[in-house]
Image (cartoon, rainbow, N blue to C red):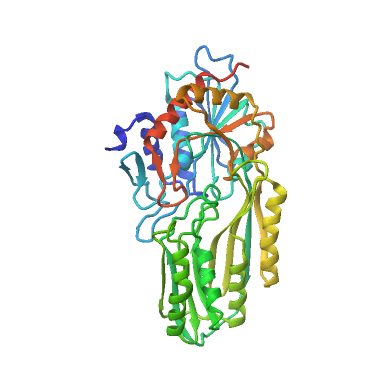
Amino acid sequence: MELSNIEPQIIWKNFSKLNAVPRPSKKEEKVIAFIKEFGENLGLETTVDEVGNVIIKKPATSGMENRKSIVMQSHLDMVCQKNNDVNFDFETQGIQMEVDGDWVKAKGTTLGADNGLGVATIMSVLESSDIPHPDLEALFTIDEETGMTGALGLKPGQLTGQILLNLDTEEDDEIDIGCAGGIDVTINQNYSTEASNGQIVRIEVKGLQGGHSGMDIHKGFGNANIILGRILYKALENQNIQLISIDGGSLRNAIPREAVALISVRNSNEFIENATEGIKKQILEEFASIEAALQINIENSTSSDKALSEEDSKKIILVLKSLHNGVYRMSPDVKDLVESSNNVARVALKEGDLKILNLSRSSVDSSKDSVAEQLKSVSELAGMKVEFSGSYPGWKPKPGSEIVQMMEKIYTEKFTEKPHVVACHAGLECGIIGANYPEMEMVSYGPTIRGAHSPDEKANISSTQKFWAFTKDILANIPLK
């Protein structure tokens, strides 16, 4: 089956057009131009603000003029991840999609359903002539995945809508009314290098699931950087180690799937034997039920690069073993909600230059600060520098709001079951937008997406049909002014 034959055809048509346009975070020029042209071709008022957000306004359909005005919002950028054996350039190529049963996937890369299906849905409403809706502002933000600079740059007064529908939730039976805030924690230091005094060993961790560092952080998935750190730490019991290079993970909001290190040791064969029969075996057993594809390769290698001293190498290894990764605290107020967490997202060591990128999240600002301060404390003990940046607020739930009650009622009547009204541990843009528009009611929902932020990302077809039907009913039943 091809995408053009899938219902609702209007959604998949627009999703296919969108996915033909490269749209990495921080490099959204092409997709901004695409959406701007889309709005202008419909004859609708279309503007691009100074940071790159696109706003398209569409008047109410006949008979809906007396309803509260709405904002439909999704972000244009996507997480760009691919399998190592896939040759693909996210800056020049469109996503290559395929249908697999009830799912739409990409061929070895992220699909961009996060948040492309939301964008495609808004496009479909904008170009429709038979969907009732009140006064509508379509807000397409940029750079949600790596800094939320679009939402942060949205100024007061640009929007007039009274209700915001954010289409960035990934379970079709959930209505989200709150989310976590976040802060970027960057650890860095520059070290002198010297000739290595031993034999070279290459350690590779690969085959992990990865996933979303907010939505999946509690699932027990392996983090390649943490696994690599465990292997190096255990090796210190029997060997002095000189680090040559580390390349692990990529984006802050993606759980690392792969990591590689080159090290120098006095006796490589002894190191490999001890690690293979010891810590490697233990880790594979630990993760056997949840990370069936995990591979740990430890082998002799070569390198022309210089190494760090044994003393500096030990400091880095101890820090990697000490950094908190995963759930930090569960919420005492909301059942099964992760309150605070950290993702050790990226570890890069090259020619003596070390960078460790973290994303700390929490729905409570003081708890978010506590996670960040813990990372800062352990790193500074080892003489490393720590910077905080990109902090953004969470979104405080308002479960009794009119729009939430209306959506609960429609969902229950339409699908003969109650939706889950929840707060999530992901970083939605609602909290940031709400800071400048405190009177605006907000809610988030969306179709079912699996494996977001990884090459395993896939969008459920029947769920998208359900989501589209739900969206049309929501628009037709927006409350009176």
* Residue at 55% over, 41% down: 52
- In the rendered image, residue 285, in percent from the top left (x then y), is placed at 44, 65
The quarter of the picture where the C terminus appears is top right
Q: List the single residue furthest toward the left.
A: 1
Q: Seen from this angle, which residue lies furthest top?
A: 63
Furthest residue to the right? 366
Looking at the image, residue 191 sits to the left or right of residue 74; the answer is: right
Name which residue lies at 61% across and 72% down.
318
**Percent x, y for residue 332?**
67, 45
* Quarter placement of the N terminus: top left
Query: Does residue 304 appear in this view?
Result: no
| Residue 326 sits in quarter | bottom right
Judge whether residue 66 can be spotted in this image: yes
In the depicted structure, whether residue 96 falls above or below residue 270: above
Residue 374 in percent (x, y) is at 69, 61
Q: Quadrant of residue 226?
A: bottom right
| Total number of numbered discs in the rendering | 0
